[in-house]
Amino acid sequence: MNILYIHFHDLQDEQLYSRLLTLLAEYTPLVQALPPDAALADVSGSLRYFGTDATALAERIRARTGGLYGLRSTVGVAANPLLARMVAADGPPSAVRTLPDDIDTVTAFLAKKPTAALQGVGPATARTLSSYGLDSVGRIAAAPLGTLQRILGVTAGRHLHDVARGLDPTPVIPSAPPRSMSVEHHFTQDELDRNRQRAALLALTDRLGLRLRGESQVACALTLTIRYADRSTTTRTRKLHEPTAHTRSLTALAYDLHDRLALQRARVRTISLRAENLIAAERASRQLLFEPTDEKARRLEAAADRARDRFGTEAVQPAGAAAIHVA
């Protein structure tokens, strides 16, 4: 019960995020960055030094981040990263929640959780499992391993069989956050409409591309995170064909990631995009496509950037994103 999952609320400053990771390193060297706003920490070797238990140490960390930076945070304390994440999400934000390392307690905690609460189970997988009557973690845990493997495949079925029982051997691997850049959109109400979700994605990629070009950076990958009405999330990452800050390329990949989630009836609360593994634009090679439409799009993009630099970022916007305001 010595793994902490720390989620910092309303955190959008990458420099502040780095300072928070440095603060966590004062308590343990085993800190794993989970950008843009979370981290894992293994405090097993720190408890004797600080003369306390993991829950009290989590309270101390939460108090310091609030006092120094005015940030609310939620900390889950459990025996492994999977359970720490889940117990952190089990209630209103801004608290320390502990799940005792006891098999009966863990089983009871997991039993009534929806399938989508398990890390790595997206809406499409949840629907597939529900069609077999496996609509809760408790029912999945009670299902034979062979049944899960017939439904999902050998590897995915084995993984689901383990996590439904609260088993997660993943270690906390110390890491610093890679250079990244994030934007997100909060819907004023839970959004079911696919077209409005795509309009938000267009506004996000437009803003992300503008920021990347303004800082002479290009992205090597793009991460899409969807947060639902029940506070569960789905995250997907994919590499770009080539490092780019071109809005058209970012939008195409964002749309593809969104389409593959098949969110027909999902109630979406927040959409986030993060450009990953940024490098300086002059270091990136670009493949010549000899496509007039692509060259025209880049020239228009450069002209729009100049207009925004002179008249403000709202001077030019994609037509499909005009009704969406990106925070």
Image (tube, helix red, strand yellow):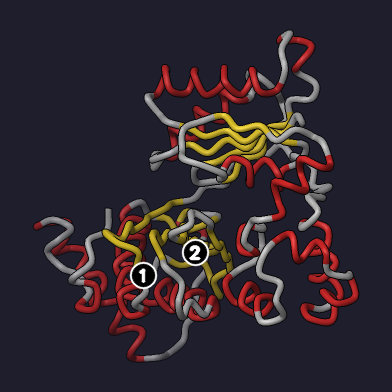
Residue at numbered disc 1: 201
Under mark 2, the amino acid is Leu
Q: Could you tell me if the residues under marks 2 and 1 are in contact, i.e. CB atoms within 8 Å?
A: yes
Residue 29 sits in which quadrant? top right
The residues bearing labels 2 and 1 have C-alpha atoms spaced at a distance of 9 Å
Q: Nearer the viewer, residue 174 or 104?
A: 104
Under mark 1, the amino acid is Leu
Residue at numbered disc 2: 224
Residue name at image x 58 percent, y 65 percent: 237
Above or below 294: residue 7:
above
Mark 1 or mark 2, which is nearer the start of the sequence? 1
Picture coordinates of residue 94 (x, y %)? 46, 33
Q: Quadrant of the N terminus?
A: top right
Q: Quick one: SS at disc 1?
A: helix
Picture coordinates of residue 260 (x, y %)? 54, 79
Above or below 292: residue 70:
above
